[in-house]
Image (cartoon, rainbow, N blue to C red):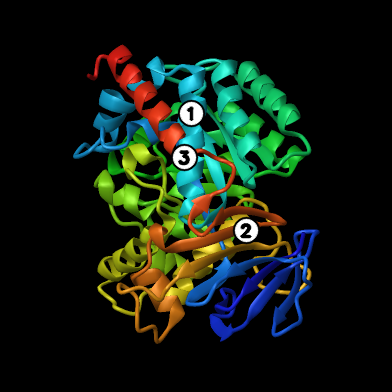
Amino acid sequence: MPIWIRGGTLLDVINGTFTDGDVLIGADGKIAALGTFAAPESAIVLEAHGCAVLHGLVNAHTHLSQTFMRGLGDDKKLLDWLKGVVWKLQAAMTPEDVYLATLLGLVENVTCGVVALTEHHKLVNSPAHSDAALRAYLEFGLPTLFAYGWNDLGDGALQLDQIIAEMERLRATAHGSNVQVCVGPMVPWRCSDEAMQRTFALAEAWQVPFHLHAAETQDEVGLMIARNGMRHIEWLARLGVLSARTQVVHGVWLSDDEMRLLQKSGARLIHCPTSNMYLASGMAKIAPLFGRGVPIALGADGSGSNNSQDMLELLKIAALLAKIETMDATALLPRHILYMACVEGAAAVGLSSAALSLGNVARLICVDIQTPRSAPVHDPFSALVYTANGADVRHVIVGNRIFVRERAVQGVDVAALIAECTQAAKALLRRAELL
């Protein structure tokens, strides 16, 4: 059935403009009319008065198996956090834990206005664990880039042939669905030269992203220099795996030469400001990189290093952190931040245009900005970035499907899911001897 979003302020996140009007989404899930029109009587009506209506946010990097880990990694540096919390819990997680944690994380994402995301799946204890995560994404239905995380060096290393076979198997399972499987090496210092080059060739053949953490902390950069005398981006360039297909997650500790390499290659940076602050990893040079024309999308990272998946909250953090890093109050404007979250995010996960235009697939959110926290609104871009949060999301529509209506997730018993996840998480902590 057609969907009529009635009332609201329509935001053009590409050009940074806005106007009042309605949106009609056809039964095919595409935008059929904008502005003022006579809607068909059969249309489902979603009231949006007082709302900003825009392309939804894209969470371009997360680990939803970490939903069960929120609050357990507080006040730890990255390597201590990994060794003391994350790796212990991952080792103890069952496939059902992975499924439940992922499903709860998806509910959180969509209620906060996320219409697509990248899962960097790093819990590869067994094929059953990967299947459980993938099943949650397939059942939930949001457009997803599923980056299979791997390392072939150090603890938990996999054989290269095993890595390739597993990616091929998962790709076949997801074929023709809302999920696209891609290549996701975990971190440079745990991946061999050969494995990087062979899996990058696979990404090229499949025409999918090559998604990896890089230059997140000074300690990690030091590990790489000790191994081969090169920094992370320098190493990627030397191997021939730095291109427009490459997605560099974090990129906090980049030299000037590395910034130039990113710019020249067309590689995309995925900025995770909340996680970088939570783990005291550092401040990425986002404003200078944006000024150089480096494509930048935004990611919440896993709830183990954020405690939340609230992408609206993250917008403000990204904007303010850029001001502090540069000591320039004009470093990044609200329209720049929303461009990263919507336009660059959509491109990062392989979606079509984020333009609010006739004929485009609808991936829309309605965010209430007539609240005591936001009103009076003089600029809806400012209201979204500096005053809104996930609780203000009223409706979420992807294609011809309503995921959230009047702040309620459709088709999911959220209270029952939370209760089940709470019990499962307690059992997990006991098994991991953290409770």
Quarter of the image for residue 175 reads top right
- At horizontal 40% and vertical 87% (from top left) the residue drawn is 378
Q: Which residue is mark 1?
A: 100
Q: Nearer the viewer, residue 102 or 76?
A: 102
Quarter of the C terminus within the rendering = top left
- At horizontal 50% and vertical 20% (from top left) the residue drawn is 96
Q: Residue furthest front?
A: 41
Label located before the other in sequence (3 or 2)? 2
Q: Which residue is mark 3?
A: 414
Three-letter code, disc 2:
Ile
Does residue 48 appear left or right of residue 306 in this picture?
Answer: right
Q: Which residue is mark 2?
A: 397
- At horizontal 45% and vertical 77% (from top left) the residue drawn is 381
Q: Position of residue 131 (x, y in %)?
A: 61, 23
Q: How many marks?
A: 3
Quarter of the image for residue 240 reads top right
Label 2 residue SS: strand
Label located before the other in sequence (3 or 1)? 1
Q: Nearer the viewer, residue 101 or 41?
A: 41
Label 1 residue SS: helix
- Point out the frontmost of discs 3 and 2: 3
Q: Position of residue 21 (x, y in %)?
A: 62, 82
